Image (tube, grey):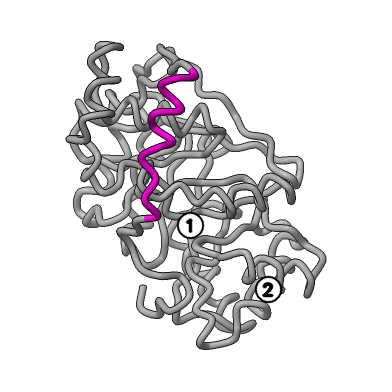
Amino acid sequence: MTTQTTSVPYMDLNDGNHMPQLGFGVFQVPLEETTEAVAHALRAGYRSIDTAAAYGNEEGVRDALQASGLDRGEVFITTKLFNTEHGRDRARRAFEASLSKLGGDYIDLYLIHWPVPSRGLYEETWETLCALRDEGRVRSIGVSNFQIDHLERIIDATGVVPSVNQIELHPRLQQPELRRFHADRGIATEAWSPLGQGELIDDPVIEEIAAEHDRTPAQVILRWHIQLGNVVIPKSVTPSRIRENFRVFEFELGDEEMRRLSELDRGERMGPDPDTFVKP
């Protein structure tokens, strides 16, 4: 199996485990395209794959991994609990279904996909994830799209701090207060929609910085995430872009460039509001 030689740094999680700082996301990748896309990513050198029950493509991730020739322990797999599966018994059944689709006998990182506060079950659901971790079924547990008040409630209820909070994060939505809370509590910040759903590619500031480095705007944005200390999971089904997104460890942004990028923050959310979102 041919791979890139670039080495991806690993992030230390608060539970003693480690995950690659750069991963490959399969949000909105149809099941029939997932295996080929993940296969390209693994050949490019990615060793972290992010999926979810709601994406309907966990089996495609499994098939790509099994065909890759890589050992299961070489690839960090993340999946997420469907919004309709909150609650102790439902969460456990949902976990078993995801594990069956992904293959193997454990999941590296299992996340509550959204807090769905209107249902009032995310604390109980978090307790179930804690139990799954204690049983060795999951290596690390975390959440996705949780706000500070959601995080405080589950930490206060269980004493267990999530290893990861996966949130919408890009130059136009930088969430500094939430990231500071993460840093204070030892929670890794993982960015979904790191490129702002592609809407930031034409930003003149990003284009200018990209030209200065002879890089693409996407590479500049991903490098910005890396230098902030975020875990980042870009998605693409195009082999050339999959490889391009992986090549973000070959250059660095200067302090002034990082400052200019920080000034792009508008608090502009492109995805749903975590306080009200229910449907996956």
Position of residue 214 measured from the top left corner of the image (x, y, whole percent): 25, 11
Residue appearing at x 70%, y 40% in the figure: 17
* Three-letter code for the amino acid on which mark 2 is drawn: Thr
Q: Which mark is residue 61?
A: none
Measured in 3D between alpha carbons, the distance from the residue under mark 1 to the one under mark 2, in whole angstroms, is 15 Å
Residue appearing at x 45%, y 39% in the figure: 232
Quadrant placement of the C terminus: bottom left
Position of residue 49 measured from the top left corner of the image (x, y, whole percent): 43, 43
Position of residue 275 measured from the top left corner of the image (x, y, whole percent): 48, 75
User: Which callout, 1 or 2, points at the residue further toward the start of the chain?
Assistant: 1
Quadrant placement of the N terminus: top left
Q: Secondary structure at mark 2?
A: helix
Boundaries of the magenta span:
255-267
Position of residue 225 measured from the top left corner of the image (x, y, whole percent): 46, 34
Q: Secondary structure at mark 1?
A: strand
| Label 2 crowd (10 A; few <14 / some 14-19 / many >=20) | many
Q: Which mark is residue 79?
A: 1
On the image, numbered disc 2 is attached to which residue?
128
Residue appearing at x 35%, y 37% in the figure: 67
- For the residue pair 165 and 213, the one nearer the viewer reads as 213
Residue 145 falls inside the magenta stretch: no
